[in-house]
Image (cartoon, grey):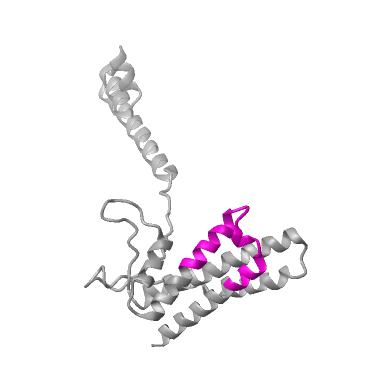
């Protein structure tokens, strides 16, 4: 009984069951034509109303080239459109705005100025390593531990024999410490004279950016 119901649900099964009940050739032909019409209608419906495949747009990723790490590989497009020293311009603007600001807002702007000064130098130094020294970021050490990208960039400059590289690395080290204090600490001796601390941070960033610019010209 269940088999007959299953066959009846399909066009060919329905034709087979009807063909078994007919007694004349005319009735057999009529049952066959009805089955073919039903099958054609089912196929046409499927072709017209089947869901369309989802269209995916290509995604373009920003990557860095690494000739040292990928010798012999085809050239990879480098997308570095942001001008990191613009953060230094923002840092100076925040200092100017802090002069006539109320005390709480003045502190917020000076703290932010230190942070932007650090990221101006960090971003430019990182780009320099990629573009001029062709050094790829290795963020996993031989023991499988994740390496901090800020520490990695600092060490690439500090561990060089060239004095300009070392000065840039030391500036990154000092600014990184001040940036962490400005961003996270509520009370710290560095914050006792925040205007003086901010001016020192801007001087380190300005001098280190000038050294980077000289290295780029050489």
Residue lying at 42% horizontally and 55% vertically, measured from the top left? 56
Q: Is residue 184 magenta?
A: yes
Quarter of the image for residue 26 reads top left
Give the residue displayed 64% in from the left and 74% down from the top: 92
Residue 206 visible within the image: yes
Q: Which span is picked out in magenta?
A: 173-200
Residue at the left extreme, as displayed? 72
In-image side of 201 versus 94 (left or right): left
Please tell me whether residue 195 is drawn above or below residue 24 in the rendered image: below
Residue 13 spot, x, y in % from top left: 29, 25
Q: Residue at x 59, y 54 (%)?
A: 185
Which of the 4 quarters of the picture holds residue 148?
bottom left
Which quadrant is the C terminus positioned in?
Answer: bottom left
Q: Is residue 70 left or right of residue 173?
A: left
- Residue in front for this viewpoint, 132 or 181: 181
- In front here: 30 or 160? 160
Name above or below for residue 147 compared with residue 9: below
Q: Does residue 31 belong to the magenta stretch? A: no
Inspect this view and state whether residue 80 appears: no
Image x and y of residue 138, in percent = 32, 61
Seen from this angle, which residue lies furthest bottom? 218
Instruction: Say which quadrant the N terminus sits in.
Output: top left
Q: Main secondary structure of the magenta part?
A: helix
């Amino acid at each position: 009984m269940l088999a007959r119901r299953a066959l009846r649900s399909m066009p060919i099964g329905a034709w087979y069951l009807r063909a078994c009940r007919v007694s004349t050739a005319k009735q057999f032909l009529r049952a066959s034509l009805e089955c073919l019409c039903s099958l054609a209608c089912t196929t046409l419906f499927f072709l017209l109303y089947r869901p369309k495949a989802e269209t995916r747009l290509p995604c373009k990723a920003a990557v860095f080239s690494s000739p040292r790490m990928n010798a012999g590989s085809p050239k990879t497009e480098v997308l570095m459109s942001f001008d990191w020293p613009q953060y230094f311009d923002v840092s100076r603007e925040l200092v100017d705005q802090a002069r006539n600001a109320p005390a709480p807002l003045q502190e917020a702007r000076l703290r932010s100025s230190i942070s932007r000064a650090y990221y101006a130098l960090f971003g430019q130094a990182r780009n320099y390593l990629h573009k001029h020294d062709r050094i790829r970021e290795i963020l996993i050490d031989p023991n499988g531990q994740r390496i901090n990208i800020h520490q990695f960039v600092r060490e690439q400059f500090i561990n060089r024999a060239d004095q300009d590289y070392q000065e840039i690395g030391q500036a990154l080290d000092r600014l990184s410490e001040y940036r962490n204090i400005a961003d996270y600490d509520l009370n710290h001796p560095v914050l006792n004279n925040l205007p003086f601390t901010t001016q020192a941070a801007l001087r380190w960033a300005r001098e280190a950016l000038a050294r980077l610019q000289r290295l780029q010209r050489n």
